[in-house]
Structures are given as C-alpha cells and as structure tokens.
C-alpha cells in the first residue's frame, strides 16, 4: 500500500491556528491499493495524524482522471462534486478524436491551417519569456506555441506524467483573439500527445467546476467527461466553529472562516 498526499500548511489570519490545502490544480491523493478498505484505513490514519498535529481543517482537490473510490472516504469528512471536466481519449485514432470536436472548433482549426498559422511544442524554452508576458521547464512540462505571421499569438503550458497530459494554463495575444489561436493550440497538443503514446489529454473544466463559458469552450474538444470532486474534513470542530462563527458545514464554501472569494474554490 502506498499513499502520496501533497499538502500545504497555511496559517489562519487572526489566530495561532493553521489548516491544510492541496496545491493548486488537481493535486489529488495518489494511491496504490489492493482494496477499498485498505485505502480507507490509510486515509483514516492520515486524518488522525493531521488532527494530532493541531490543524483545523483539510481541503483537497481530487483528480478527475486518477479517480479514487468514494467508499474510501466514508465517514472521513465530506466529498463534494462540483461539476464535470473535459478530457480527450488519445487511445482513439485521429479520425475519431477529430470527429469528437465541435464543428465550430474544427472550422477554426481548419481556418488556422489554411492561413498558415504554426503550432509547435517548444521544449527548448526559446519562447518562454514571451509566454510569461502573455500569462506567466522541466522535462515533463511542455510549452506549446502558436505563431501567426511570425508573431507569437498564443502559448500554453502542458504537464505530462504516466500517459496523462494536463492542460495547465495559457495566454493569448488580445490582437489575435478573433483568430482563435487557443483552439489551434489544443488541437495541435492533441495530435502531438497522441503521437507520443499518451493515453489522455485532460483539459479540466470551468472555474471552480462551474458550467461556464470556459467549460463550454473546453467541451467543444471532446464528449468525454469526468467528475471533479473535493474532499473536505473538519479536523477540529470546536476551533472551526470558533473561527467561522457557525457550526461546521463542509458542503458550502470551505473552510467557512476564510470567506468566499469571487469564484468557487
């Protein structure tokens, strides 16, 4: 049995307490286990250890592709499903992948190709400074660049681990947005990752799992959907209630004492 769970310990403003959160993205617990009961036992030991350390709460984002069984979290806090994410099955042949892309996306990609737009993976880092300007490399991170008329129109960062290619972030030049360079970029990465033998390209979902315009854009590349869930545990109920001014409610914004930002966590 092996269990890896990356966490960040944070001080809680206005108190001497701390809580725990997974790093940004889909930094899910990763486990090798023989059965659900064994995994639940390991997660239970983690929760108890975190309680003993004096932490108030735990917030962990789970990975839609490396999905863990819900039963492993039974009576260990609350699992909240936020919405769907989009992935592309790279084990399908290129024709099936292409047919799974929304018609308007395919039309934009075809227009880019006819117009001579160029998409490529920049593993030399030559265009990394330009990418930072557009938004913000190690061997498992890849920078994809879209070039239009000799200028960089779009760049995106993609992680690659064990057959999963993860779309992390990207930036677009506002002057070329009407040409949809990000559609061209994702289509290129789809083809590039397939040729490398990857199994899935995970695009993620909307902001905080919402069914918003970002989700609509990503959904145009594939019909494959995966659930995005978070795991929330109140480790110290008395301290949590003192800090939040209410009884623990792990299904709302979590942790409540930090206050809801402009979008869901």
Image: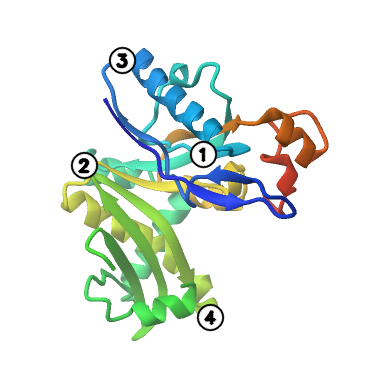
> Which of the pair 254/160 is nearer the observer?
254
Q: Position of residue 167 (x, y in %)?
A: 39, 54
Mark nearer the N terminus (4 vs 1) = 1
Q: Mark 2 points at which residue?
A: 93
| Mark 2 or mark 3, whichever is nearer to me | 3
Mark nearer the N terminus (2 vs 3) = 3
Mark nearer the N terminus (4 vs 3) = 3
- Number of the label disc, if any, that sits on residue 35: 3
Is the residue 128 above or below the residue 109 in the image? below
Residue 106 is at least partly visible in this image = yes
Is the residue 43 above or below the residue 34 in the image? below
- Number of the label disc, if any, that sits on residue 252: none
Q: Name the residue under label 4.
A: 175
67 sits to left or right of 191: right
Q: Where is residue 190 in the image (x, y as percent from the top left)?
A: 29, 53
Q: Could you tell me how far apart the alpha carbons at marks 2 and 4 are, in whole angstroms?
A: 34 Å
| Mark 2 or mark 1, whichever is nearer to me | 1
Q: Name the residue under label 1.
A: 60
Q: Could you tell me how far apart the alpha carbons at marks 2 and 3 are, in whole angstroms?
A: 33 Å
Q: Could you tell me how far apart the alpha carbons at marks 4 and 3 are, in whole angstroms?
A: 53 Å
């Amino acid at each position: 049995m092996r269990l890896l769970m990356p966490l960040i310990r944070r001080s809680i403003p206005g108190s001497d307490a701390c809580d725990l959160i997974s790093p940004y993205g889909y930094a899910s617990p990763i486990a090798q286990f023989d059965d659900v009961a064994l995994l639940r036992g390991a997660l239970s030991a983690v929760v108890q250890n975190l309680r003993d350390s004096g932490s108030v709460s735990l917030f962990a984002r789970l990975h839609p592709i490396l999905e863990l069984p819900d039963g492993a979290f039974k009576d260990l806090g609350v699992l909240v499903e936020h919405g769907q994410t989009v992935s592309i099955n790279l084990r399908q042949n290129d024709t099936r992948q292409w047919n799974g892309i929304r018609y308007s996306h395919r039309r934009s990609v075809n227009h880019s190709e006819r117009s001579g737009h160029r998409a490529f993976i920049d593993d030399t880092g030559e265009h990394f400074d330009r990418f930072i300007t557009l938004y913000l490399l190690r061997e498992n991170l890849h920078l994809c660049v879209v070039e239009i008329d000799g200028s960089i129109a779009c760049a995106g960062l993609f992680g690659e681990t064990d057959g999963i290619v993860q779309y992390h972030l990207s930036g677009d030049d506002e002057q070329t947005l009407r040409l949809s360079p990000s559609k061209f970029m994702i289509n290129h990465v789809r083809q590039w990752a397939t040729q490398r033998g990857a199994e899935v390209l995970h695009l993620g979902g909307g902001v905080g799992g919402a069914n918003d315009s970002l989700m609509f854009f990503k959904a145009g590349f594939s019909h494959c959907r995966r659930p995005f869930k978070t795991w929330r545990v109140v480790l110290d109920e008395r301290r949590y209630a003192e800090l939040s001014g209410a009884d623990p409610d792990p299904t709302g914004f979590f942790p409540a004492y930090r206050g809801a930002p402009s979008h869901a966590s």
